[in-house]
Amino acid sequence: MSNTSLAPLPSSDRTDITARLRDALLGASFSADGLLDLLGAPAYAALARSETVPALRATRGDSPLETLVRLFLLQQPVPHARVAGVLPVEDCLEGGWLTRVGGDEVAAAVDVRPYGGPGGEDWFIVSDLGCAVGGAGGIGSRAEGVVLGVGGASTTLAGITVREPVASALDLGTGSGIQALHAAQHATRVSATDLNPRALHITALTLALSGAPAADLREGSLFEPVADETFDLIVSNPPFVISPGARLTYRDAGMVGDDLCRTLVQEAGDRLNEGGYAQFLANWQHVEGEDWQDRLRSWVPRGCDAWIVQREVQDVTQYAELWLRDAGDHHGDPVEYQARYDAWLDEFEARKVKAVGFGWITLRRLGPDRLGAGGSGAELPSVVLEEWPHSVEQPLGDTVRAHFERVDYLRAHDDAALLAGHFRLAGEIVQEQVGLPGAEDPEHVVLRQHRGMRRATKVDTVGAGFAGVCDGTLSAGHILDAIAQLVGEDPVLLRDRTPAQIRLLVEQGFIEPATR
């Protein structure tokens, strides 16, 4: 792998220098909150789009924070004397965080970007210069081994990850180390792997500069570096891009089609401890004559529950343009751009791919305590696939965990047990009645969530009435008996036909079992 056009990285062994640099950054309020206060919301948001002009305009002064923003975020040379008033500049030069340029100026060797942790932690994400985020301007470097910082995919994965205390976690394809940094807050031991040794070096810098424990760093592809180990949590934002060649290590796996994602998912089952979660971002092909759900269902390993959410679908032209822009090809030679565009479309045409899906995949390894009566893990998996392009409320980690808890409950309760159960309405559910103005009865009733997945589901009057009185006091059967008496319906028939609707309301999180 060629890294000849990439700058040398700071030393990962001089933890003393890294600690002094961290103290100096925090002392100057070089944090997510500090940046927002200095730059204002528009300029701060523009930085996340790789647009630097608003931030340049907002840092024309000489305060310590303005100096750090120009140095590390905007990658502008700054006079040595000015930096010396903010940082231990000679230490930073010795440790490789800064380099000398010109006669009396210094420049950053890497991008250092403040990142606010979920508990208010002040973290710092290290990446290659100009590569903190991608966006319409491209990644800032076409070197094969370039390491990006935190983009939308990274924050999405961090947001959907189940956060609970675990003994061991694996960040597969760690990149700049953001997932390992999150995992270090609730995992006793964190392992991080990457095919790119530069990414492992940068992950070590990210963890150290953020004040987090060091991770066990392993070089290699997929699960090869941890072939004999199992984990309680596996997370991966892998190089999932379906491309005609391996140009950029962080995004192109060099495998055919969506084989990288398929292999990752299929092999994850054997790497999970019982009850453990594996959570991935992925792309998958929509092939002519094939249902995408059937394709993804075949990926799920035996003995695992799965929840797969397709968030977006792009036709092959949109998809090719997205990743050509990501690499900055649209700014280059038009003839070369056209040739690369053709190569992408040739590849898709050869495999009869008409579109590409983007989404999340969560696996949970089944164990004896997760099973319904009379079953085994191999016989009773729950594999839920859905298309959900609508807005959600991040973070979703608790929502993901609750999904699998509801799966456990429904798997263990037949219709009779369901009717004997007690339920309560979940938080922040509203009811909407839809119909013509002045009509005596609504055409239909919709229950809508204002949290988590923000689902909406249509229910009949019985379902709406049932959900409305669920407060954990009465069993489901007794509630239906009362409704039957109210509407003049046979209670036996109502009990027979309603469990399916109750099961759906539980499955989608509108009502939840009440502990009595």
Image (cartoon, rainbow, N blue to C red):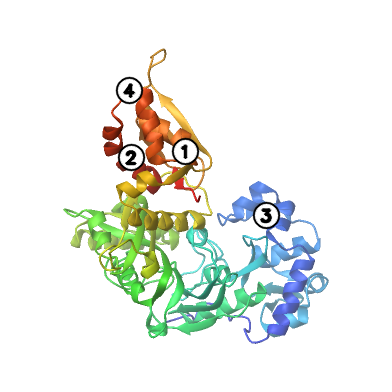
- N-terminal of the pair, mark 2 or mark 1, is 1
Cβ–Cβ under 8 Å for marks 4 and 2: no
- N-terminal of the pair, mark 3 or mark 4, is 3
Mark whose residue sits in front, 4 or 2: 4
| Residue identified by numbered label 1 | 470
- For mark 4, does the 10 Å Cα neighbourhood hold few (<14), some (14 to 19), or many (20 or more) residues? few
| Residue identified by numbered label 2 | 501
Quadrant in which residue 494 is drawn: top left
Name the residue at 50% across, 60% down: 134
- For this rendering, which residue is in front, 170 or 319? 170
Mark whose residue sits in front, 2 or 1: 1
Which amino acid, mark 4? Gly
Q: Is residue 112 visible?
A: no
Kindly state the secondary structure of the residue where label 3 is placed: helix
Measured in 3D between alpha carbons, the distance from the residue under mark 1 to the one under mark 4, in whole angstroms, is 20 Å
Indicate the position of residue 123 as horizontal and vertical percent values: 65, 67
Measured in 3D between alpha carbons, the distance from the residue under mark 2 to the one under mark 3, in whole angstroms, is 53 Å
Mark whose residue sits in front, 1 or 4: 4
Measured in 3D between alpha carbons, the distance from the residue under mark 1 to the one under mark 3, in whole angstroms, is 52 Å
| Residue identified by numbered label 4 | 488
Which amino acid, mark 3? Ala
Cβ–Cβ under 8 Å for marks 2 and 1: no
Residue 55: numbered disc: 3
Mark whose residue sits in front, 2 or 3: 2
Which amino acid, mark 1? Cys
- For this rendering, which residue is in front, 67 or 207? 207
Kindly state the secondary structure of the residue where label 2 is placed: helix
